[in-house]
Image (spheres, rainbow, N blue to C red):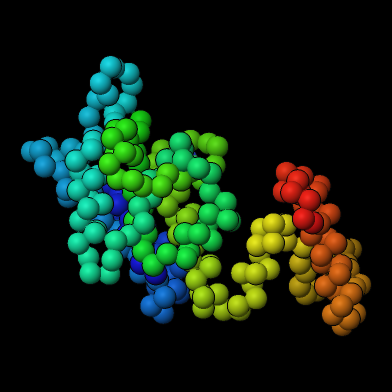
Amino acid sequence: MRIDVLTLFPQVFDGFVASSIVGRAVASGLLTVACHDFREHAKNKHRSVDDRPFGGGPGMVLMCQPALDAFEALDADPDGKPLRILLTPQGERLDQRIVEELASVPRLALLCGHYEGFDERIRALSGAREISIGDYVLSGGESAAMVLIDAVTRLLPGALGDEQSARDDSFSDGLLEYPQYTRPREYRGLSVPEVLLSGDHGRIEQWRRSQARMRTSQRRPDLMEDGSH
Ligand code: 6GU
């Protein structure tokens, strides 16, 4: 998979793209992440990419031309055209179902917003899908882009050492994950549940499923509402 990121702060992705699961996916050639400073597409002499809003009001608005030219420059690539995404608090809220959809395409282009927002015509003319990562306000789309890249990368076949782990993650079956323990068997008076030491894989599986259901209904009843659990 190839992900192009259009941002005014490409350097903030350096450590992220080199570390952990994403770093390994990049190193092994499963994933390419290319960050582009879309200021390079600014045409005016101050190289500005934002301007004051018509009608007045606070802050600055991202201009059409640099953003659209940056998207269009990616289409010239022989690898084919990416699926365009605008990262904005006005988008549909990212969840594991959307992550699965995005992980299934060969190329993504993520435009990170800043300032008070995008000129509305960027939406219309880019045809981009708009994604938010939750109901709170970020200063820019960069951290949201990293969230999206991380979540998508986990689903690329071969990205996780153990193929089982993506399937066992919280949300992969619509439930939160069951409780996990490692050594020692007892720590500060708290013991590992006996069933996990029993070696009885059927009982362990049953216990984990029931813990996952209990935990989900206590912490996230909203996830239980579809009745499939
Ligand atoms: Cl994608 N961008 C910004 N600026 N704020 C957000 C967001 C995105 N998702 C949640 N809050």
Q: Tell me what residue is drawn at x 58 percent, y 56 percent.
A: 96
In the picture, measured across the screen, residue 23 lies left or right of residue 100, that is left
Q: Is residue 150 visible?
A: no
Q: Position of residue 35 (x, y in %)?
A: 30, 58
Image height of 46 relative to 211, above or below: above
Q: Residue pushed farthest left?
A: 45
Choose between 173 and 17: the one closer to the eye.
Answer: 173
Find residue 11 and report its horizontal and vertical position in percent.
31, 55
Establish if 167 lies above or below 176: below
Residue at 61 percent of width and 69 percent of height: 166
Q: Is residue 128 above or below residue 44?
A: below
Please say whether residue 100 is visible from this viewpoint.
Answer: yes
Using the rendered view, name the quadrant where residue 12 is placed.
bottom left
Residue drawn 36% across the image and 64% down it: 107
Image quadrant containing the N terminus: bottom left
| Farthest-out residue, bottom | 199
Position of 65 with respect to 148 (left or right) is left
Q: Is residue 169 left or right of residue 111?
A: right
The percent position of residue 148, horizontal first and vertical second, equals 47, 55
Query: Relative to 216, is 1 above or below?
Result: below
Q: Position of residue 151 (x, y in %)?
A: 52, 60
In this view, the residue in front, 58 or 175, is 175
Q: Residue at x 57, y 79 (%)?
A: 161
Q: State which quarter of the image contains the C terminus.
A: bottom right
Query: Which picture quadrant has residue 23?
Result: bottom left
